[in-house]
């Protein structure tokens, strides 16, 4: 059983409040999907720092226990869209954390460059590990109203 605790900074806590996101429900969502994916018979407790950052692109630095979530969304026009984008960004970076910390994927497997990300080209969007994150973005969109 893997237990996930999110240690959110002030900006993230403010966003949770503004969007009406229940941290414990979000943790439960993450735990359910994490435990479906990564099987273990032991108890593991992981604390992940969640930091709010300016701009519209979130990031994860490989092998760290911190994810950085963008507080803006350039293509969103409604609060509902912004809420979904925020949750998707968080889940996306969290999925990278699983790859690095639980699945032990080496950083060198992430073969695309900053330029590929900017251009959103196939090097980036068809990367196996990005596709895994994109899958979780779809799941969280579906469960948006329950978090
Ligand atoms: Zn990514």
Image: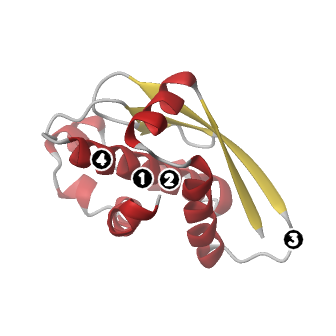
Q: Quadrant of residue 114?
A: top left
> Which one is in front in this view, the residue at disc 2 or the one at disc 4?
4
Q: Is residue 85 above or below residue 7?
A: below
Task: Measure the alpha-carbon separation of dots 1 and 2.
Answer: 7 Å
Which residue in the protein does label 1 denote? 92
Task: Measure the alpha-carbon separation of dots 3 and 2.
Answer: 22 Å
Which residue in the protein does label 3 denote? 42
For residue 116, side relative to residue 34 (left or right): left
Discs 1, 2 touching: Cβ within 8 Å: yes
Discs 3, 2 touching: Cβ within 8 Å: no
**Helix, strand or loop under label 2:** helix
Q: How many C-alpha atoms fall within 10 Å of the one at disc 4: few (<14), some, or many (≥20)? A: many
Who comes first in sequence, dot 4 or dot 1? 4
Task: Measure the alpha-carbon separation of dots 3 and 4.
Answer: 33 Å
Task: Measure the alpha-carbon separation of dots 4 and 1.
Answer: 10 Å
For residue 99, side relative to residue 18 (left or right): right
Q: Does the beta carbon at disc 2 come under 8 Å from ligand 1? A: yes
Discs 2, 4 touching: Cβ within 8 Å: no
**Horizontal and vertical percent position of residue 66:** 60, 36
Q: Quadrant of residue 72?
A: top left
The image's mark for residue 85 is: 4
Q: Is residue 41 above or below residue 119?
A: below
> Which one is in front in this view, the residue at disc 3 or the one at disc 2?
3
């Amino acid at each position: 059983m893997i237990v996930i605790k999110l240690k959110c900074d002030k900006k993230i806590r403010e966003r949770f409040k503004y969007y009406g996101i229940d941290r414990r429900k979000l943790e439960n969502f993450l735990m359910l999907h994490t435990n479906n994916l990564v099987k273990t018979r032991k108890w593991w407790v992981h604390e992940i720092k969640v930091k709010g950052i300016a701009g519209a692109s979130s990031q994860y630095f490989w092998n760290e226990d911190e994810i950085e979530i963008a507080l803006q969304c350039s293509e969103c026009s409604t609060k509902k869209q912004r809420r979904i984008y925020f949750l998707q960004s968080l889940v996306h970076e969290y999925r990278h954390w699983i790859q690095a910390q639980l699945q032990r994927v080496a950083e060198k497997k992430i073969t695309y460059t900053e330029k590929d990300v900017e251009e959103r080209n196939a090097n980036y969007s068809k990367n196996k590990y990005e596709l895994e994150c994109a899958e979780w973005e779809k799941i969280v969109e579906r469960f948006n109203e329950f978090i």
